[in-house]
Amino acid sequence: MKSIRLGKGLMTLIVASFMGSTASAGMLQSVGKGEGQVNIVAWPGYIERGTTDKAFDWVTGFEKSSGCKVNVKTAGTSDEMVALMNEGGFDLVTASGDASLRLIAGKRVQEINTSLVANWSEVDDRLKNAEWHTVGGKHYGTPYQWGSNVLMYNTDTFKTAPTSWNVVFEEMQLPDGKSNKGRVQAFDGPIYIADAALYLMSAKPELGIKDPYELNEDQFKAALDLLRIQRKVVSRYWHDAFVQIDDFTNEGVVASSSWPFQVNIMQGEKKPIASTIPKEGATGWADTTMMHTDAANPNCAYKWMNHSLTAKVQGDLAAWFGSVPANLDACKGNALLGDGGCAKNGLGDFDRISFWRTPVSKCNTQGTCVPYYRWVTSYIAVLGGR
């Protein structure tokens, strides 16, 4: 796996934040009767109750067996998830690596008693102690799903899959003889700077980028310069999956970074859509179900975490979202996913993915790196044409 190491500065910050902390003092020691509800912040498509497609429902059965009503607030970016958890009022969040460490350092999530999660033993060993939810030997969440930010493209425009991310970064003529200007999109989030850096690792090796989340000033400037070039060709910076689906369906968009979720939906509707991971590799996400420090419904939260790791839920979700299960037992015998589903969704791409994580100033690949707050302000400036 690439790009999952913690910078020493962030590790120090996180460890220090827990010294003397009382956050873990309230960790549940047994799961009792549910409180009647659980409130979850989740990515779109992550928690389905059959309203879009009756075959995909891992909520209704849980509500009946547990007595815990599931309330979901969807969020389109990691920054939105962090903001919602900072506000409070939620029990759980399905956080990606660029949010999970911020939530841990900010004491917004609590240590999980994995002995109370019976299905913990079924979690992929590559994820059990992943550094985006494990600090000082303590787990601050349960793995949920993982996958890559794919290059989604229109097969009428591209008769063969694009081999490089350059089709969304630089103005060019596409295979249909038309310019890509106004026909491509980019992700609406500061972490997308890493996508530009990943492309530059191959396109401009002289920059010396070894990790797309660890950029010195010159490397960071090069990534921003590329994003300013990109701004001249993108039609929209997307974060709403369903808006992107509409743009590909009705607005003439033909290529963009995307999630397998959008690809699956449009392929299910027989749209001319496919996806690929280009030669440069891809950024990606390994998401963790994390519990708020002040969760009002901890018993229902634990019940949901255990339910979310069952092979049936994991397989159904992977089939729906196009992701890879945290419980690999889901890869066999699931009617919706099929025995080839995990391979199709990228099980073999684990080592090609640079998983999202929060950039910090003290990094591993070089002396000093540009911290995340600068990524935020700089990306806002790029979107504003500066």
Image (cartoon, grey):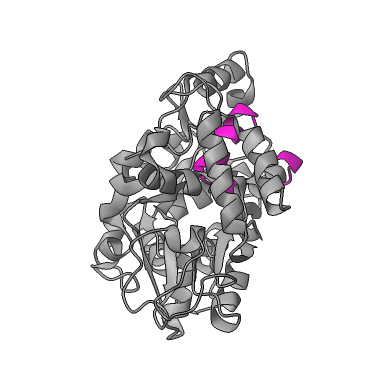
Judge from the rendering whether residue 117 lies leftward or rightward of residue 373; answer left or right. Answer: left
Judge from the rendering whether residue 102 lies leftward or rightward of residue 356; answer left or right. Answer: right
Total tally of numbered discs in the picture: 0
Q: Is residue 127 above or below residue 274?
A: above
Q: Nearer the viewer, residue 352 or 336?
A: 352
Which residues lie in the magenta part? 86-109
Residue 248 among magenta residues: no
Q: Is residue 367 above or below residue 358?
A: above
Q: Is residue 310 above or below residue 235?
A: above
Judge from the rendering whether residue 313 lies leftward or rightward of residue 75; answer left or right. Answer: left
Quadrant position of residue 293: top right
Where is residue 204? Give x, y as percent.
40, 43
- In the image as oriented, which residue stretches furthest toward the right? 87
Q: Nearer the viewer, residue 234 or 98?
A: 234
- Residue 330 seen in the current view: yes
The structure residue drawn at horizontal position 36% and vertical position 67%, both measured from the top left corner, is: 162
Where is residue 161? Give x, y as percent.
33, 70
- In the image as oriented, which residue stretches furthest toward the top? 20
The structure residue drawn at horizontal position 64% and vertical position 47%, both measured from the top left corner, is: 81
Residue 88 among magenta residues: yes
Q: Nearer the viewer, residue 339 or 152?
A: 152
Where is residue 380? Give x, y as percent.
70, 47
- In the image as oriented, which residue stretches furthest toward the bottom? 270
Q: Quadrant of the N terminus?
A: top left
The structure residue drawn at horizontal position 50% and vertical position 41%, both measured from the top left corner, is: 97
Where is residue 55? Give x, y as percent.
45, 77
- Residue 209 seen in the current view: no
The structure residue drawn at horizontal position 58% and vertical position 44%, both measured from the top left corner, is: 224
